[in-house]
Image (tube, grey):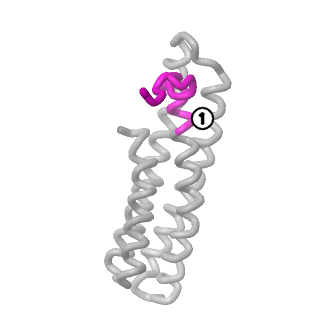
């Protein structure tokens, strides 16, 4: 749960953000910024649990350093993106009542930034899935005719 929430949460936050921009609803825009903050905090927690999980998973047969190293790099990139998004969101929430135009610009910037962060989330999830689900890469689940 800890490791999956940031990956799903960033997409959820983006969808809320898009909805709020389309509907021009400032309260829902604030909600999307709070979700970005929650994703940043949860991404930090997930990243901090990674070393312990790596030590456990390395004891499993067939787990190589290449698999865990690749996942670790994408997880770090995702973490940085999520923390940047969280910081920008906190600033947006702070100025939301005093500088409405800047607040609206921030929410639009967040949509673009989050699109990039979602790509990092996908790569983090794929490389993490490859560690324990080698059957995916080996093609065990081929279409039955």
Q: Nearer the viewer, residue 82 or 115?
A: 115
Q: Nearer the viewer, residue 106 or 127?
A: 127
On whether residue 143 falls in the magenta region, the answer is yes
Judge left or right: residue 45 versus residue 112: left
Q: Nearer the viewer, residue 62 or 136?
A: 136
Q: For the stretch drawn in magenta, what is the main secondary structure?
A: helix
Q: Measured from the top left, where is residue 63 in percent x and y? A: 58, 17
On whether residue 49 falls in the magenta region, the answer is no
In this rendering, the answer to whether 127 lies above or below 65 is: below
Q: Measured from the top left, where is residue 24 in percent x and y? A: 38, 84
Q: Measured from the top left, where is residue 7 in percent x and y? A: 45, 48
- The image quarter containing residue 1 is top left
10 Å neighbourhood of mark 1: few (<14), some, or many (≥20)? Answer: many
Position of the C terminus by quadrant: top left
Q: Measured from the top left, where is residue 125 in percent x and y? A: 51, 40
Q: Please, which residue is most extreme toward the front here?
A: 145
Name which residue lies at 56% across and 23% down: 138
Name which residue lies at 53% across and 47% down: 122
- The image quarter containing residue 76 is top right
User: What is the number of callouts on the image?
Assistant: 1
Secondary structure of the residue carrying tag 1 is helix
- Range of the magenta residues? 126-145
Name which residue lies at 56% across and 56% down: 117
Judge left or right: residue 104 versus residue 138: left
In this rendering, the answer to whether 60 lies above or below 90 is: above
Name which residue lies at 40% across and 53% down: 9
Q: Which residue is mark 1?
A: 71
């Amino acid at each position: 749960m800890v490791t999956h929430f940031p990956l799903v949460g960033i997409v959820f936050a983006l969808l809320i953000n898009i909805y709020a921009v389309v509907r021009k609803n400032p309260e829902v825009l604030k909600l999307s910024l709070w979700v970005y903050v929650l994703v940043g905090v949860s991404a930090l927690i997930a990243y901090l649990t990674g070393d312990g999980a790596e030590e456990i998973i390395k004891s499993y047969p067939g787990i190589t350093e290449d698999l865990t190293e690749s996942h670790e790099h994408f997880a770090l990139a995702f973490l940085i993106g999520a923390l940047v998004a969280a910081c920008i969101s906190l600033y947006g929430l702070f100025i939301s009542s005093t500088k409405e135009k800047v607040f609206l610009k921030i929410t639009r910037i967040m949509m673009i930034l989050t699109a990039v962060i979602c790509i990092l989330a996908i790569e983090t999830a794929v490389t993490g899935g490859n560690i324990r689900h080698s059957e995916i890469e080996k093609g065990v689940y081929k279409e039955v005719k």
